Image (cartoon, rainbow, N blue to C red):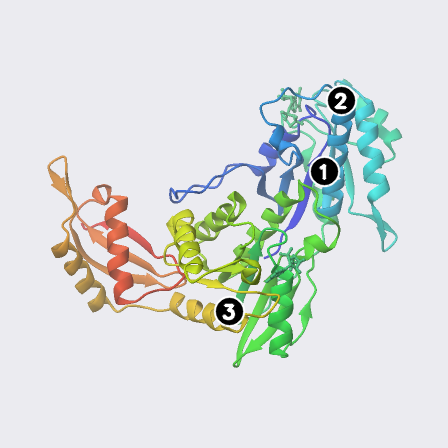
Amino acid sequence: MARSIVALVGRPNVGKSTLFNRLAGEPLAIVDDIPGTTRDRLFATAEWSGVEFDIVDTGGIDPSAARAGREPLSIGSAEFIKEIRSQAELAIQDADAILFLVDAISGLTPADREVAQILRRKQQMVDGKPYPPVFLVVNKADSANLRAVASEFYELGMGEPYPISALHGTGTGDLLDDLIASLPKVEEAGEDDSVKIAIVGKPNAGKSSLLNRLVGEERAIVSPIPGTTRDAVDTRIEYNGVPITLIDTAGIRRRGKIEPGVEKYSVLRSLRAIERSDVALLMIDATTGITAQDTHIAGFILEAWKSAVVLVNKWDAVEKDSHTMAEYTARLRHELNFMDYVPILFISAKTGQRVDQVLPLALRVQEERLARLNTGTINRLIQEAQERHAPVVRGGRSLHIYYGTQVRSDPPTFLLFCNDPKLAHFSYLRFLENVFRKEYPFTGTPIRFVLKPRH
Ligand code: GDP
Ligand code: GDP
C-alpha cells in the first residue's frame, strides 16, 4: 500500500530527531543479518489512528553529508542558511506533508523565518489550499508557560502553531489527528492478480527510458493509474496475456533537476516500490558502474524477500571487446555477492538492445518464485546434502537436519526440523541453498530456511 511521505523540517536542535524517534516507535525487528545491508534511520514508518505514513528526518538528508567530519556550520553563516534552504526545498518538492519544527525555549530565530519563507514560496495552490500542507510545530513546549509562547510563532504566517513536547510526548495527538486528515487518501488496491514489477535504481540509470520502451513496444497499455500520492505512477500492460503492473519510480526526476539530497528521497521511493512489487528490476548504469546506492537498493530487495533481475543499462555506451561482458558480470557478482542467484541482463534502453528479454525474464523469475518442491524431493535433498558434506562439529555437537517441508512460496520458504537450530551455521545453510538450487533454480528469488527443533 502506498504511504504518504511526511518530512520533518527545521533548523538544527529544534528536536527533529527526538520527534522522529517518538513517531517511529520501536525500530522494526531485524529478521536476519544480511551482509551489505545498512540500516540508517533516515526514514521510518509511523502510524496514527490506523493510518500509516513514512517520516523523513531532513536532518538526515544533509545535502552536504559528504562534509561529514568537518566542523559544524556556524549558525547564521551563508553556508548554514544555504543548507537549511536546500533541505526545505527538497521537502516541499517531495513530501506529501511537512512538519515544520521551531523551538519554544529559544523562541523565534532568523533561521526559522528563512525556512518559513521558503516553504511559503514553494507551496502550490491545489483546490484552493496550499500544497503540500505545512504544520507549524512548536516543540519543547514542556510547560504551560512554554505552551503560551507558541502564539509568538503566528507571525511566521504558517497557520496555527501546535505546541508539543517531543521529549515528553505531549501535544502530539492533536497534531497527528490534523496531519493524517490532510494526507492524500490511499485507495486500497482492489483485487489485482497482475505481476508487480518495480523499476528501481538511481536517478539517471535509465528507468523512464526503459519504461517507455516496455510500454511503447507492447502497445497493450490498459491504463495508466495515477498514484494517489506523489509516488510512482503505475502502468498496466499485458504481456502474452499476463497482466503486469509496472511500478515506476522515475517520476521524481521529472519535477526538477537533481539536487544532491534528492537521491535520498529517490532511495525512499525505490524502497516503497520494492515493497509493493513481486520482482524488482534493479537498473545499473553501465557507464558509471555499480555504486553504494545500487548495493543499498539491492540490500533492500533482499531484505524485503523480493525477487530481482539486474539490468545493466546503457550497454551501447560501453566500449567493449569479447571479454567485457564476462568481466562486468564477475565484478557485479562480486559486489552483489549476496545475490548470486539473480540473473543479469545487459541492455540498452536507448537502442532497444535485449529490451525484449526483460519481461520474459521477469515473468520467469516470478514463476519460479511461486514454485513448490514436494516433500519427497526436499527430504532427498536434505539427506544428499548431509551425506556429501556433513555439518561441522561445534562444541562436541553437530547439526542434524531430519526432514523438511516447503511451508510457503512467494518467496519459497522451507521449514527444516533439526536437533538444534543454534548449530546451523550460515555457511552450511548457504551450501544447502545451493543444493536446492541445483534441483530447482528459483532464479532471481531468495530462499528462506526456517529451522525448528524436533521435539
Ligand atoms: P534536531 O537537531 O532538530 O534533530 O534536534 P534533536 O532532536 O537532536 O534535539 C536537540 C536537543 O533538544 C536535544 O538535546 C533534545 O533532547 C532536546 N529536545 C528535543 N525535544 C525536546 C522537548 O520537547 N523538550 C525539551 N526540553 N528538549 C527537547
Ligand atoms: P531515470 O532517471 O532512471 O529515469 O533515467 P532516464 O531514463 O531519464 O535516463 C537518463 C539519461 O540516460 C537520459 O539522458 C537518457 O537518454 C540516457 N539513457 C537512458 N538509457 C540509455 C541507454 O541505454 N544508453 C544510453 N547511451 N543512454 C541512455
Report the front residue among 204 and 252: 204
Residue at image x 64%, y 76%?
221
Residue 314 at x, y = what percent? Answer: 57, 60
> Which label's residue is closer to the chain start, 3 or 2?
2
User: Is the C-beta separation of discs 3 and 1 under 8 Å?
Assistant: no
Left or right position of 109 against 273:
right
> Which label's residue is closer to the chain start, 2 or 1?
2
Badge 2 crowding class, 10 Å Cα cut-off, few under 14, some 14 to 19, many 20 or more, is many
Residue at image x 76%, y 20%?
146
Query: Regarding mark 3 in the picture, which secondary structure is present there?
Result: helix
Badge 1 crowding class, 10 Å Cα cut-off, few under 14, some 14 to 19, many 20 or more, is some
Left or right position of 380 against 183:
left
Label 2: which residue? 104
Label 3: which residue? 358
Image quadrant of ligand 2 equals bottom right
Which amino acid, mark 1? Leu
Classify 414 as above or below 6: below
Residue at image x 82%, y 37%?
118
> Which label's residue is closer to the chain start, 3 or 1?
1
Report the front residue among 432 and 371: 432
Label 1: which residue? 175
Q: Is residue 191 visible?
A: no
Front of the two marks 3 and 2: 3
Query: Regarding mark 2 in the picture, which secondary structure is present there?
Result: loop
Residue 45 at x, y = what percent? Answer: 58, 44
Is the shortest distance between ligand 2 and the CB of mark 3 under 8 Å? Answer: no
Rounded to the nearest whole Å, what is the CA distance between mark 3 and mark 2?
55 Å
Rounded to the nearest whole Å, what is the CA distance between mark 3 and mark 1?
46 Å
Rounded to the nearest whole Å, what is the CA distance between mark 2 and mark 1?
16 Å
Which amino acid, mark 2? Ala
